[in-house]
Image: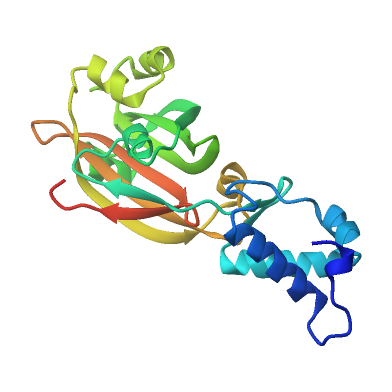
């Protein structure tokens, strides 16, 4: 669409004309999922309007879920939502590979701290017992979708920090300590407002909600080996529970 395509004086607002043209381009596949749109200034020059008009058009598309606006990065065509399957054995990488998405992640921090009441209750240990806390950012195709806090009892995994840095994988690290298989005992899901730090890491607007999941994994003997609290970008992931899977 160019300035010549704008129909002025027809009774249809300019911002709506721009929004409808961009919508047609997205639906027709002329703009691919994940593609970054031109800047407000570039579109304003192309359409011969002011930036406020472009901003209103883009905001309308964002309300429809066709684009996402990432502060400091730009506006992108929205990708399809990932059906994250919660099963008896839930593994982040396997889940994404099943959707033909490339999984990746970064360990943000690994620390030791005394277990607070919720952690102690989940891991069936006494409050104040040392635990390792692993903060991890999970990505799909290079885009952040989750920030997770993983809690492990130190007594069960005494050398976990060094092993995790060496192996780069929570699953392989647990295998090294004799937990070759672990299953999900319980998963709880709630909706929350994003904390500023989480919104920044997830590259989403601070006023957008997140999904928060709490999970407990157990070994073959039924003993808790890990408790996790994960914050998910709610517009990129939906939880699909598969009983018995």
Residue 31, percent from left and from top = 64, 51
| Quarter of the C terminus within the rendering | top left
Q: Is residue 151 left or right of residue 232?
A: left
The image quadrant that residue 215 belongs to is top left
Residue at image location 77% in from the left, 50% down from the top: 38
The residue lying furthest to the left in this view is: 221
The one of 12 and 60 positioned closer to us in this rendering: 12
The one of 204 and 240 positioned closer to us in this rendering: 240
Q: Is residue 235 left or right of residue 2?
A: left
Q: Is residue 160 left or right of residue 185?
A: right
Residue at image location 51% in from the left, 36% down from the top: 141
Residue 154 visible in the picture: no
| Quarter of the N terminus within the rendering | bottom right
Q: Is residue 139 left or right of residue 242?
A: right
Residue 150, percent from left and from top = 37, 35
Residue at image location 72% in from the left, 45% down from the top: 73
Give the mark count.
Answer: 0
Residue 155, percent from left and from top = 25, 22
Residue 148, percent from left and from top = 43, 40
The one of 25 and 242 positioned closer to us in this rendering: 25
Q: Is residue 163 above or below residue 56?
A: above
Residue 222 visible in the picture: yes
Structure colour scheme: rainbow
Q: Is residue 73 above or below residue 103?
A: below
């Amino acid at each position: 669409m160019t300035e010549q395509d704008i129909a002025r004086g027809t009774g249809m607002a300019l911002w709506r004309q721009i929004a409808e043209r961009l919508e047609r381009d997205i639906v027709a596949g002329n703009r691919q999922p994940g593609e970054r749109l031109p800047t407000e200034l570039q579109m304003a020059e192309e359409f011969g309007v002011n930036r406020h008009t472009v901003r209103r058009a883009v905001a309308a598309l964002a309300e429809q879920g066709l684009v996402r606006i990432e502060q400091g990065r730009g506006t992108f065509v929205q990708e399809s939502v990932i059906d994250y399957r919660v099963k008896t054995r839930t593994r982040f990488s396997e889940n994404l590979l099943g959707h033909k998405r490339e999984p990746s992640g970064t360990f943000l921090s690994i620390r030791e701290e005394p277990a607070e009441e919720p952690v102690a209750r989940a891991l069936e240990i006494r409050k104040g017992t040392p635990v390792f806390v692993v903060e991890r950012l999970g990505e799909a195709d290079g885009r952040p979708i989750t920030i997770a806090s993983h809690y492990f009892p130190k007594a069960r995994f005494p050398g976990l920090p060094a092993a995790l840095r060496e192996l780069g994988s929570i699953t392989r690290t647990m295998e090294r300590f004799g937990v070759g298989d672990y299953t999900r005992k319980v998963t709880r899901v709630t909706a929350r407002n994003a904390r500023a730090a989480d919104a920044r890491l997830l590259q989403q607007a601070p006023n957008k909600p997140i999904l928060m999941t709490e999970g407990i994994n157990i070994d073959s003997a039924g003993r808790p080996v890990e408790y996790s609290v994960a914050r998910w970008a709610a517009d990129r992931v939906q939880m699909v529970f598969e009983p018995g899977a």
